Structure formats: C-alpha cells, structure tokens
Image (spheres, helix red, strand yellow):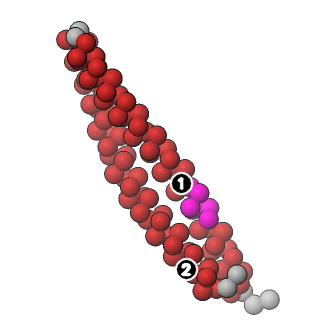
Amino acid sequence: METTLLKRRLIDVSDRLRRLQDDLAVVTEQVEFYEDAVDEARLQALAAETPLSDARARDIRQQADALLVRQKFLTTTIEGLRVEQDALLDRMSQEMTPQ
C-alpha cells in the first residue's frame, strides 16, 4: 500500500480514536452520575412505596442501562481502532524499512 495512503488512513483512525475517547470520557461520567441517581431513586421508592416513585426508579435505571450499553460499544470500538492503528503502523514501518 502506498505510504501516503497509509498516512491518511492512520490520521483518520487517530482522529476517530480521539473523538471516541472523548465521547467515552463523557459517557463514563454520565454512567457514574446515573448509578448514584439509581441508588437514590431506589431508596426513595422504598421509602415512598408509591407507583410513581417506582416508575421513576425504573426510568432512571433504564437510562443508566442505555448509557452502559453505549459505554460498552465505545470501549469495543476503541479497542478495534487501536488494533487497526497498530496494524497500520506495522505496515508503514515495513514499507519504510529497506528490503
């Protein structure tokens, strides 16, 4: 593969990796917030014993679960991009090494 094409792909992968890592940091912070909110809502639901408080606790739990799914997706995608980045660097290194 041509070195300039490798460089472009490497830059693209690096940019995507950076954006996803930033997104993961935000989602991780949100997960921590929602986990605390889930605990608080669960305690309030136990104390109040009303259908409304139970529904609120379930809603918060569902939001936290959705964030956990997003966090897992981002983590998996980042791992894949790191593997791709390593492969591109290896190929670039091989092309630049005199045969």
**Image coords of residue 60 (percent x, y):** 30, 29
Instruction: Kindly identify the amino acid type of the residue bearing the numbered disc 2.
Output: Arg
**Nearest the eye: 5 or 81:** 5
What residue does disc 1 label?
77
Left or right of residue 84: residue 73: left
Q: Residue furthest top?
A: 49
**Nearest the eye: 90 or 63:** 63
Give SS at disc 1: helix
**Nearest the eye: 17 or 50:** 50
What residue does disc 2 label?
8
- The answer to whether residue 64 is above or below residue 83 is above
Residue at image x 35%, y 34%?
63
Q: Which residues are magenta?
A: 79-84
Residue 42's tag is none
Residue at image x 44%, y 45%?
71
| Quarter of the view holding residue 38 | top left
**Image coords of residue 13 (percent x, y):** 53, 69
Q: Which quadrant of the rendered structure holds the C terminus?
A: bottom right
Mark closest to the chain's N terminus, 2 or 1: 2
Label 1 neighbour load within 10 Å: few <14, some 14-19, many 20+: some
Instruction: Kindly identify the amino acid type of the residue bearing the numbered disc 1.
Output: Thr
- The answer to whether residue 73 is above or below residue 50 is below
Residue at image x 52%, y 56%?
78
State whether the magenta stretch is mostly helix, strand or loop.
helix
**Image coords of residue 39 (percent x, y):** 29, 25
